Amino acid sequence: MEKHFERASEVVARLSGALDDFAKVQDSIKTLESYYGSKEWKKDFRDDEKGLLPPDLKRGVLSEDGIWNLLEEVRELKERMQSLSKQ
């Protein structure tokens, strides 16, 4: 029983910290959701294709797959948390 207790305590502590971090990025996630597919994103994407953006600029948000995959992961995580809360 002690092993179960220790294992569960450790995992719960890590999950609690991860959920705290996840809560802190919700505004960023909402901002990314609004940006992705917007006129601004489309303009930035076109400007990048034309070579108008600085070559050393990070482009993670201009990768259609990158931003879509992140937002999809967020959706799946929320579904998993809802599913687990029903158990």
Image (cartoon, grey):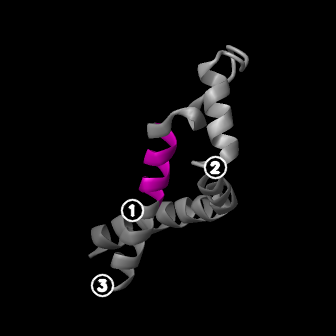
- Amino acid tagged 1: Glu
Q: CA distance from mark 2 to mark 1?
A: 23 Å
Q: What predominant SS class does the magenta segment belong to?
A: helix
- Say which residue label 1 marks: 76
Q: Quadrant of residue 45?
A: top right
SS type, badge 2? loop
Counting from the top left corner in percent of width and height, residue 85 is at 39, 82
* Quadrant the N terminus occupies: bottom left
Of marks 2 and 3, the one in the foreground: 2
Horizontal side of residue 3 vs 49, given as left or right: left
- Amino acid tagged 2: Ser
User: Residue 87 got which mark?
Assistant: 3
Q: Which residues are magenta?
A: 66-74
SS type, badge 3? loop
- Say which residue label 2 marks: 38
Of marks 2 and 1, the one in the foreground: 2
Q: Dot 2: within a 10 Å radius of its alpha carbon, few (fewer than 14), some, or many (20 or more) residues? A: few
- Name the residue at 59% across, 21% down: 49
Q: Is residue 67 magenta?
A: yes
- Name the residue at 68% across, 55% down: 31
